[in-house]
Amino acid sequence: MTIRFCQLCGAQVDFRIPAGDSLARHICASCGYIHYENPRIVVGCVAEFEGRILLCKRAIEPRMGYWTLPAGFMENGESTSEGAARETEEEAGAVVSIDAAFALFSIAHIHQVHLFYRGRLPSASYLAGVESLEVGLFAAEDIPWDSLAFRSVKLCLQDYLADRSRGAFGFHEADLPPV
Amino acid sequence: MTIRFCQLCGAQVDFRIPAGDSLARHICASCGYIHYENPRIVVGCVAEFEGRILLCKRAIEPRMGYWTLPAGFMENGESTSEGAARETEEEAGAVVSIDAAFALFSIAHIHQVHLFYRGRLPSASYLAGVESLEVGLFAAEDIPWDSLAFRSVKLCLQDYLADRSRGAFGFHEADLPPV
């Protein structure tokens, strides 16, 4: 996405390095406002009920029709765990009790950081939200590995099941370069 | 910061809820582009050399003259750990070897997430960058607790020293509401 006009005054912007900075930014030629662009955070959740994990089949692009953990862009005014719980409710109609941060993935080339929490569902109550075609609880052996939407989701599920097998959850992180 | 004009076409924006969304966004009245606003990530580092921790005295507002861990806004095109190492080099002139993610703080009311890494310095080589008045290595008993710049920095240092004392580093997180 290219910034052409100033958000504040509507004048055209230059693309140059501000004084004291080291990277070029979009700077308003009229009012001087600097338009910083920064990575966005995707927050999500591995929500478990009686050993099964909540997955959503995406109803929107990218990766429509593929399975994912409930996750989405963090909003202003919420914490990371609040965002993870909100996305679980919006996409899967499920109220999750968040336990702890579990996995962090940096995907530098698309300017995203994915952060997944561990959580528990108090019941097997869920319902596909508008961004999901279908929602379900999957036992480890039923996870649709070949139909997962994103690399971060696959890695998170692998880490989760490995930790669960050994009986102790850690915190995982990885940088995901372009494939 | 209020968005008044479209970044893409320069027309005025409306503030309304887009179709299928639940929050109001700044939407271009002409081209329809939606200007999402999301929290920003601050990445930083607890960099240790022979038991002492690297701190910087801020040369810029906010909190000029107060001590902080090297940290700053994550940039597009880098991973969280790369950002933490970059900030350590920029603010403290030190090349740090990053070990692992250590602490995560959500500060919802200012739309920020602070993520600190643990790292080690290969030598006591450092130099105040343009955003620092002074840089130093501090033993635990010499940390200027009353002159720290930010709550997240104080909590991170407390968690770090507590973990170090018990001989095992975990991953910590907290939501920091307005004081």
Image: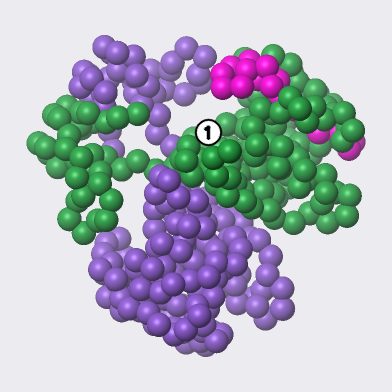
Chain colours: A purple, B green
The crowd level at tag 1 (other Cα within 10 Å; few <14, some 14-19, many 20+) is many
Along the line of sight, the residue nearer the viewer: A164 or B162: B162
Q: Residue at the location (35% across, 73% down)? A: A93
Q: How many marks?
A: 1
Q: Residue at the location (21% across, 59% down)? A: B20
Q: Secondary structure at mark 1?
A: strand
Amino acid type, residue under disc 1 in the picture: Phe
Residue A34 at x, y percent in the picture: 37, 21
Left/right placement of residue A84 relative to residue B100 reads left
Residue A162 at x, y percent in the picture: 64, 75
Residue A169 at x, y percent in the picture: 68, 70
Q: Chain of mark 1?
A: B
- Snapshot quadrant of residue B66: top right
Along the line of sight, the residue nearer the viewer: A36 or A175: A36
- Verify whether residue B64 appears in magenta: yes
Q: Residue at the location (35% across, 29% down)? A: B1
- Snapshot quadrant of residue B171: bottom right
- Verify whether residue B17 appears in magenta: no
The residue indicated by pointer 1 is: B73
- Snapshot quadrant of residue B80: top right
Seen from this angle, which residue lies furthest left?
Answer: B30
Q: From where the camera sits, is residue B18 visible?
A: yes
Residue A38 at x, y percent in the picture: 43, 37
The range drawn in magenta is B49-67
